[in-house]
Amino acid sequence: MTLRRAILPVIALLALFLAAGARADQPIFYSHDGAAIGGYDTVSYFTSGAPVRGRPDIAVMWKGAVWLFSSMSNREMFEANPRAYAPQFGGYCAYGVSRGYTMETDPTSWQIIGGKLYLIHDSGVLALWTRDTVGNIALSEANWPDVLFD
């Protein structure tokens, strides 16, 4: 009986560890039209101040999604530090994530805040997002990545 009581917590911890590992292996980046950010170059938001379409011949696979770039230099910048350029919350609408759900984004509705790229569903939702970006970011961070599994 005592051995059984000692083993049950170990089994429970192992189950939690395996479940967390399964979650970590799942791709978290939303892709539409066959590529992350609908084929837009994620580095261009930072370097050009505007989204630029990527090219299929300048691509890289990262975190379960294909990322397209408008130039080799942008691809190299991304490969050197993908987390610096990848959109927050897996490329899902940051406002939607702040409200506890995921929804697709329009690559032309976006903001860079604190050096991070946030994609938004559309220009109307962008207006809601900008009313309280600090609060919305805090809510999104609290909900991420759990919204992927709800």
Image (tube, rainbow, N blue to C red):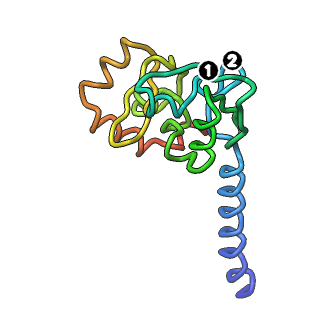
Q: How many numbered marks appear?
A: 2
**Residue 22 visible somewhere in the drawing:** yes
Residue under the point 69% across and 35% down: 65
On the image, numbered disc 2 is attached to which residue?
A: 33
Residue 60 spot, x, y in % from top left: 71, 37
Residue 20 spot, x, y in % from top left: 65, 57
Residue under the point 62% across and 30% down: 71
* Displayed quadrant of residue 90: top right
On the image, numbered disc 1 is attached to which residue?
A: 38
Q: Amino acid at mark 2?
A: Asp
Q: Quadrant of the N terminus?
A: bottom right
The dot on residue 139 is none
In this picture, residue 53 sits left or right of residue 94: right
* Displayed quadrant of residue 136: top left
Q: Amino acid at mark 1?
A: Gly
Q: Earlier in the sequence, mark 1 or mark 2?
A: 2
Residue furthest top as drawn: 124
CB of mark 1 within 8 Å of CB of mark 2? yes
**SS category of the residue bearing label 1:** helix
Taking depth in this image into account, of 105 and 55 the one nearest to the observer is 55
Residue 126 spot, x, y in % from top left: 36, 19
- For label 2, the crowd category at 10 Å Cα-Cα, with few meaning under 14, some 14 to 19 and many 20 or more, is few
Residue under the point 45% across and 41% down: 143
In this picture, residue 48 sits left or right of residue 9: left
In this picture, residue 11 sits left or right of residue 83: right
Residue furthest left as drawn: 131
* Displayed quadrant of residue 78: top right
Q: Quadrant of the C terminus?
A: top right
